[in-house]
Amino acid sequence: MTSAGKVIKKFQAKNVVNLDPALKKKTWIIVNTANTTVQTTRSGSVARHLSNHAVKMFQRVNVPLVQNPRCTKTVEQLTNQDFRYYDKDGFELCQAEQRYYEAEGHPLDQPILNHRLWQEEWYTIDHPRLTLDHAMILHRCSFEEEAREQLLELKKTIPYADLLLRTRQQWGFDFDLDYVTDSGEIVEVLHVECDYNNFNQFESKLYEFEDRIERLDFEDAAKHIVRCRDEWSHLQGFTQNDWKANELLGWKKSEYTEKAI
């Protein structure tokens, strides 16, 4: 119930079944542990009934999903300063990590959040009122072979090299959708992030999320979030995101994260 005493019903997604059969399958580019590229097509046991609005609204970028992200090559002239500000809870990279990623040829050229990390655009949107602040797939590497040997040696004089040695492979997705109201105000509609140290769990959650958002009419969803402002605007911090994720997706939390070490 809102402060005005009006009951606002929980958001109900509208499914539209008139879909071109060719759109019922999706293909991801998967890079396996041998660093060779294969294509996998996924389709659920139940035909996916996507909202026509969602099909037209979102364009999914075929980002390669790397099953074994790692750094194996050595780099020169690393200093103690290069290992400072290591991110233990996400995907941001200290200077040393960036050097190793560059040596391996991993993509660091999409500064989506004004940071250099392995992040690649995952969705784009074409809508006059809805805009994606960001939608990206994330990877984080382990350090193996020659890179690991170098770090073991560096650890003798640079203790923080230990953190890179203990870094676990990590995968994630981050989705943040905004809406422009009639008055020109920007309202965040949905912001979720899911990080995993297990590729299969990541892949499963990614597909689940894609199927869910592509069933929603986000124009209706955005208007619903605005109407329900009194129910979430007083909440602190990430609890606003949690409320919206629960309302639109049925999730208890908006963020599921793993430690990098």
Image: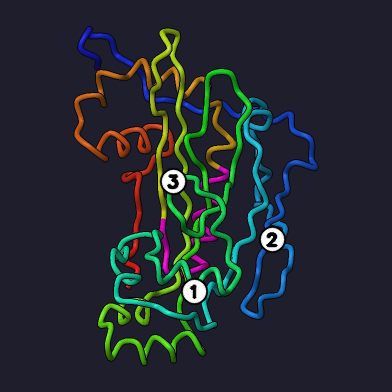
Residue 29 — which label?
2
Q: Nearer the viewer, mark 1 or mark 2?
A: 1
Q: Position of residue 108 (x, y in %)?
A: 54, 58
Could you tell me how far apart the alpha carbons at marks 3 and 2 are, in whole angstroms? Answer: 26 Å
- Residue 134 inside the magenta-drawn segment: no
- Residue 208 inside the magenta-drawn segment: yes
Residue closest to the eye, 196 or 82: 82
Q: How is the image coloured?
A: rainbow
Residue 114 — which label?
3
Q: Nearer the viewer, mark 3 or mark 2?
A: 3
**Eyeballing the image, is 213 above or below 261?**
above
Side (left or right) of 187 relative to 124 = left
Which corner quadrant holds the N terminus? top left
Q: Earlier in the sequence, mark 3 or mark 2?
A: 2
> Dot 3 lies on which element?
loop
Q: Position of residue 181 (x, y in %)?
A: 43, 14
- Residue 95: quarter of image: bottom left
Could you tell me how far apart the alpha carbons at marks 1 and 2 are, in whole angstroms? Answer: 24 Å
- Residue carrying label 1: 100
Q: Earlier in the sequence, mark 1 or mark 2?
A: 2
